[in-house]
Amino acid sequence: MARPVIHDAALRARLVSTATEQICERGPSALVLRDVAAAAGTSTSAIYSLFGGKAELLTAVIEEAFISFGDSQRRAASGGLAALGRAYRQWALGHRALYGLMFGGAAAAGFDCRPAEDIAASSIGPLHTTVATLLGQAGPKEPAHLVAAAIWGQVHGLVSLELAQVGVPGLEATWDATYETAIRGIVRLYGAG
């Protein structure tokens, strides 16, 4: 007779969800496995059995964050570059701790936690597809992957500065106005949206 499965996919998902909630409330450095297990109605042995340890649990949280972020990008893609840029910022502002963990990784968490490359890359796939389509219609002057990287860098940089609450001396504009100016510039340069 087979032993019953104690640590199943549902428990794994519950642990990732619980860890995500705690990270959003307290930040990644305050994550305590004992607290996660208790809140999920299980023991720390379940975390070690399903993930291997804290770094692996954090990696699972980061991967789920990239999936959520990618879903928001896919929903926005039909609206073109402007919609993608706005969705990027909206997701980041709504998920500050996760955004920091996604792009700060080990520095944000204090552990080596890197998501699978395909998961992270697919989250920005809608931008690459949109840029390739726009450049294809206009006749490519620059490689689509370089244009997508340049757009991503500008959007990511502005969002990161906003989240870090970096003020620019003498800058009178709000982050909303600054971000919209950047989006309009991107759209003027690379296509409709």
Image: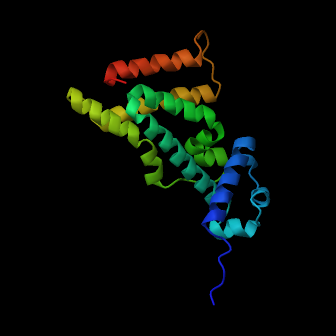
User: The N terminus lies in which quarter of the figure?
Assistant: bottom right
* Image label count: 0
Note whether 156 is above or below 62 in the view shown: above
Residue at 33% across, 39% down: 129
Q: Is residue 125 above or below residue 193?
A: below
Whole-percent x, y for residue 131 in the image: 33, 33
| Front position in the image: 191 or 171 | 191
Foreground residue among 36 and 148: 36
Residue 152 placement, left or right of 41: left
Q: Position of residue 47 (x, y in %)?
A: 69, 65
Can residue 42 be seen at all in this image of the molecule? yes
Q: Quadrant of residue 138?
A: top left
Snapshot quadrant of residue 35:
bottom right
Judging depth in this view, the residue of 71 and 88 nearest the camera is: 71
At 59% across and 15% down in the image, what residue appears?
174
Relative to 66, residue 9 above or below: below
Residue farthest toward the left in the current orientation of the protein = 139
Q: In this view, does 9 lie to the left or right of 80?
A: right
Horizontal side of 163 relative to 42 (left or right) equals left
Residue 149 point in image, percent of width and height: 39, 35
Image quarter hosting the C terminus: top left
Q: Is residue 112 visible?
A: no
